[in-house]
Each structure stands twice: as C-alpha cells, then as structure tokens.
Amino acid sequence: MENPRKPSVSMSVPATRAGQTAHPQRTYGRGHGRATQADVAELAGVTTMTVSRFMRSPSHVGSVTAEKIREAVETTRYILNKNAGLLAGGRSSIVAVIVPSIASSAFSSTVQALGDGLQRHGLELLLAATNYELQREEQQIRSLLAWSPSALVVTGHKHTRAANDLLRRAQASGIPVVVMWDHDGARKEFVQIGFDHSLVGSMMASHLLDRGHRDLLYVSNGDPRDVRSEKRCQAFVCKAQDSGAKVRVVSLPYDMDAMAAGREVMRVQLLDGLPRAMAFSSDFPAAGAFLQAQRSAIAVPDQLAMMGFGDYPIATQVGAGLSTIGVDRLALGALCAQQVISMVAGDSSREVHPNDRQIVPKIFQRETT
Amino acid sequence: MENPRKPSVSMSVPATRAGQTAHPQRTYGRGHGRATQADVAELAGVTTMTVSRFMRSPSHVGSVTAEKIREAVETTRYILNKNAGLLAGGRSSIVAVIVPSIASSAFSSTVQALGDGLQRHGLELLLAATNYELQREEQQIRSLLAWSPSALVVTGHKHTRAANDLLRRAQASGIPVVVMWDHDGARKEFVQIGFDHSLVGSMMASHLLDRGHRDLLYVSNGDPRDVRSEKRCQAFVCKAQDSGAKVRVVSLPYDMDAMAAGREVMRVQLLDGLPRAMAFSSDFPAAGAFLQAQRSAIAVPDQLAMMGFGDYPIATQVGAGLSTIGVDRLALGALCAQQVISMVAGDSSREVHPNDRQIVPKIFQRETT
DNA sequence: TTGAAAGCGCTAACAG
DNA sequence: CTGTTAGCGCTTTCAA
C-alpha cells in the first residue's frame, strides 16, 4: 500500500558515470516512489540541471538533448515537483484566494473569472471560504500564507486585527495583496478592485426618491456579518432620511432560500400595509417578493415599486423585468486576475489603471420602478 | 521593493553558540526575507528540531521550552513554510479538486461543502475549473499533481486517455483519487461518490409516462461536452421509446442565461405546437419555460406537464412549484469530504460505505406534473 | 524531552 | 549549451 519505492525503469543498474561520487545507500526511508529529475537525468545521460532547464523552457537546451530528455520523462513518467522547485527557486505559481462563500453566485462567478484569468498565465487557485467568519478568515490567511503563494486575494477590507497584520506583513515581504469586491477611496494600504457598496445603497435610494417615492422600505439581508450588505443598507437609509422621506428596514428571515425569504417578507408586508417602494439586499429576495406581490395582484410599479441588487439573471426573468443595480462580476474577477498577474510579474505597466479599479455600479431600470 | 533580507529581529548578532560551525556568509541570493525555524530556534535557544516539534504538536515539548518558543515565534512573526515541510516530510495538506465550472451552482455548492468538510480536518483546496474541456482537464491534473496533493477529486469519469493514465498513476503512487458527481456501478477503478445520470433520465421519463403522457419533449442542454447532461437525455429518450411513446429532443440556445434559454424554447414550442409533456436538462430552463407558458395562459399540468432537474431552489419559486428530480448537492460534497479525509488518514473504517456512495436521485413532485 | 546529522527534489549562480 | 556546487527550510531517524 505504501511507497512502492523507485519506479522500475530507473532501477536498472545506476551505471554511475566515472568521476561522480557513488550514490550513498539510502539510510533514511523517504521519498514517495515517483521519479525525480535525477532519474530522468540519469536515463537521458545528462545532469539534473539540464533536465530542470528543459522542464521550464525546452527551447533552452539543445535539440538532441531535448529529445533524449523528452523520452526519459516519458518512460519514467516524471512529474515536476513544484514544492521542491518553490523551495529552491522561491517562485510560486499559487495564488491564494479567500471569499466569504463559494456557493453564493455572487462570488462564484468572480472566482470563476479570476481562476480562468490566472490559469491562462500558469497560476493556480488555492481557495478558502470563510463563511463570513472573520476569525476563520484569519486562520485561513495564516494557513494559505504557509504555502508561500505568489499573491493573496481577499474579499473586502474588514478583517481581524491579526489578519490585517498578516496581510500587511505579507505585502511587506513581497507577496502582493489584492482586496476585491470592495472599494473604499480612503483606503490606500492594499490594491482594491471592487465597488463602493455605500454608493450602491445611496444610488438605490436616489433612484426611488427620484421617482417621487417618499415611503421606503429596505429589505436587508439580516446577517450582520455580511458587512457589504450592511453598508448598502445604511447608505440607503441615510440617503432616504436626508431627503426627508420615510424609511424603514426589515430583515430577511434567516436560513432560508433567498427567493423564499423575499416571498415571506412580502407576505408580511401585504398584511402590515405596503410601503410605496421596496429595495432589496439582492435580486433573489426581490424576485421572490415580486412573484408574491404578483400573486396578490399588486400593481408594480404603480402601487409598489421594487428594486433589487446584483444584476443577476433572475432579475430579467420575473414579470417584465426587475429594476436592479450591480456590477459585472465576471469583469470584476477578470480585472483581479489582470492585476494579480501584473503584480506577480512585477510589470506595473500592465496593472489595472487606478481609475478602473473602482467599478461604477450600473442601474438597470426595468419594469418595477 | 524586493526581499528586504532577514527580519531585523533575528539580525542582532548571530551569537553562534560554541561548537557550531559558523554560518558561512551567504554566497547565493536566495531566501525571501521571512523568518525561518532557525531564526526562531536561535532566539529561543533551542534547535530547529524542537521548534519543528512545537509547531506540529506543542504538547510534545517541555512547557518552559514551549513558552520560549511561543515568544520567539511571536517576535520573529514566524510563519511555517509548508513547502519545505512537504518536501522533507512527504505529507501534504492540499487536496486538488477539478470541476467543470465554479460559476455553475451545481458544482459551487458541492465544492463549498467539500471545502468546509476538508477544512475541518486541516486540508486545503487547490481548485481548477475545466470549463468542460477535457484537454484542459488533463493539463490541470498534471499541474495539480505537481504539488503532491494528498488526494485528488475529479468530476465524472470521462477524461482523456492521458488524464486517465495520470489518475491511475497517482492512485498507484498513493494519492487517493475520488470521482464525484457520477456513479457508474460498472466502474471500479476509482472511488465514486455521485449518482447515475442515466437513472435520472429514465426516472424522469417514467414519471411522465406514468402520468399517461405519450408525447414527450426533452429539452437538452445542447452542449455535447456536458456528458452527464447528454446521459440524462439519452436515457430519457430510450425509456420513452421503449414504452412506445413519441419523443423528441430540442436543444437550448447556446450562450444565453439558462432561464432565458428555457423561455426561448417555450416560445418556439408555443408556435410549433406543444407536446404533452416537457422534461428539461435543469430546473433553470424549466423555470424560464414555465414562466413563459404562464404568460401564454397555458394550463400546467393539464395542458402541458413540465419537469426540471437538479432540485434547485428556483423550482419551488415558480408558480405553485415545479416538479423536479435531484440529489442533495451539499450532502454530496460532504460525503466526498468524508471519503477523502478517511482515505488520506488511511482509516478505511471511516470511509463512506460503498452502498452510500451511490446517491439515489429523489423526485420532488409538485404542481407541474 | 532534546539534539545531530542527513537529505527531501529542485534551482541559483557561476564557470566552462 | 551544459555542468558543478551549494543550499532553499523543513523533518526524518537515531542517539542521548
């Protein structure tokens, strides 16, 4: 079951070439049975250095040698050991990424785009999900940093004190840190690629206020750990209050599918007396609420205006289309990838232009406002 | 900007203890400026061995020593280098996972559950998305294997020849391989945790046939690279034909949001003349089609029966609920995690029982059939 | 409970 | 274009 020793191929008489110190017999039971560069080198009749060069840039070795090495790689079934390479050379192709949740379509599309972009440049994704727990994030940062990643991407700028220290230290020791999903003009410590969630909140409020609605309801996610959602909520409320409108906040029921939660909120509001306009923490509850309102024959937007957030496909599917606001999550991921790649390469000319790092949320006005 | 040399803390006079060979001056520009176990050891007045032991099991060193090391770790801001550890010790905490897509909610929830389970046991997720391209998957397997992961999880059993070789070789060299999402009783080479997509197809057909429908339409995903979807489609058609029913297949328009694609198909069918029952490759197009049918005042299920696949939340949200069939994707991910963890630990008693590795798809009958 | 020696597999630097 | 040498930071084994 365990370590089947060296592959048979390279066992056939070491044939130590003259002048080379004989391979001392193995005193320690290490190794994992896979072929090493030494095995390949021996078979090809070259040194490990040449094999090493070949593996990284085949064109940098002679064509005859290259062919011999290629064969030897084939027969020994050699697979590069990146750990050893990293230890010796200091260059990693791993990019560590931390998101609150993989299952949420908000982050999964960003991660997908990020991963695609990175892969095109030979970078790999070491991924962790915090489940919105800062303590867990801190531990994950520590854990991922132990792999000496070539860059670290985290979501947002709210972290534990210790986590922030780790990020700062990482950056100081040459590991680029990119904060994604959030963008706060006042913060300069790390590169940020994202958008201003406060702006989203106030844009939502403005959109509704501009249409003359003075009795607003914000349906918040209700999870205080989701700081970005809270930010949107607060900005919405501020904007509404500043304009002298009436504004309330209710939370979505916890631990329930997002659309179903939106339905539930609408059910309650239908009994309690509807506001004039509702804004939601995401398109999913908004869509659920819309369907529920539709069932009760509420006239939208004449009787009740509704607006979601995120620009998810679902918003185009309910009724004649739900008004929403959002950013292109795939583009966001792609920008992150570009930024990471250029920072890893040390090519500042390819970095995302500072003006483009703050993505401007876009309003999609459809039939519900 | 680059490698700020050793941290100042450990720079204060090497104070080489007697009998130790003096540290030769650095001839090679290596290192990355972070503290090493040697730095910690020196500061704590012990050898690296003791630090190493402390890092892995603090209880295995004396309590006075432990305290000194703890302090030294703090002041040097030491972070373990897992690459070096892996190289020396041969044990990795990385689990490589390959899925067709991260953005698809099908896989993202499974990956989320898998990641959560793994993390509880100190294992980390190295993730790659193939975008349904087998060639890319092969390259990814090769690439991930180069990190000496402690296990490898792939999606389904359709791979390139070379990829299959790699998987076989990995398993032979002691890296457990788990195939997830698919389960084919005839295949025994790798542990499988998933379900039989052919069974899903025939169950869908049976469900509709049992309700007396003899004019069926299967709305397939239309991407031949999605082998599991194709399998469901074929099984559906076979089952329907075997029973003598009329059955047709149409494909969803390509490169379009899934719900919108479902709508589009329904639009066309409404013009062409509706079948008696429709089965969809997923709940999303089914939901879109349902909404479109609803708009045209089609009586469902009396005039047209509809059925989705996947048991996604959306299925509970359209109309009074869409009938569907699916498996618990979070449970699937959790089972994978359990299996991987036990295989990595070499604890076969904790492995998922073979009978539980094949997940039985469940039919959720709601209002559309 | 702690230490000494050896070496995991690879690559940087330099020489030829 | 290729080889030599040293060493990346850690853990193994064995000894005290």
Image (cartoon, coloured by chain):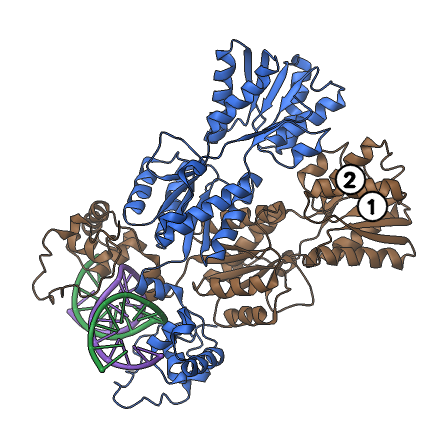
Chain colours: A blue, B brown, C green, D purple
Residue A250 visible in the shown view:
no
Q: Which one is in front in this view, the residue at disc 1 or the one at disc 2? A: 2
Q: Amino acid at mark 1?
A: Met
Q: Amino acid at mark 2?
A: Ala
Vertical position of residue B56 compared to residue B260: above or below: below
Question: Which quarter of the image is occupied by the C terminus of chain B?
Answer: top right
| Chain name for mark 1 | B
Left or right of A163 on screen, residue A254: right
Q: On the image, numbered disc 1 is attached to which residue?
A: B278
Quadrant of the rendered image containing residue B164: bottom right
Horizontal placement of B130 versus B60: left or right? right
Instruction: State the separation of the CA atoms marked 1 and 2.
Output: 10 Å
In the picture as drawn, the residue positioned furthest to the top comes out as A244
Indicate the position of residue B304 as horizontal and vertical percent values. Answer: 87, 40
Determine which quarter of the picture holds residue A49.
Answer: bottom left
Q: Are marks 1 and 2 on the same chain?
A: yes
Name the residue located 52 percent from the left edge and 31 percent from the top edge.
A361
Q: How many marks?
A: 2
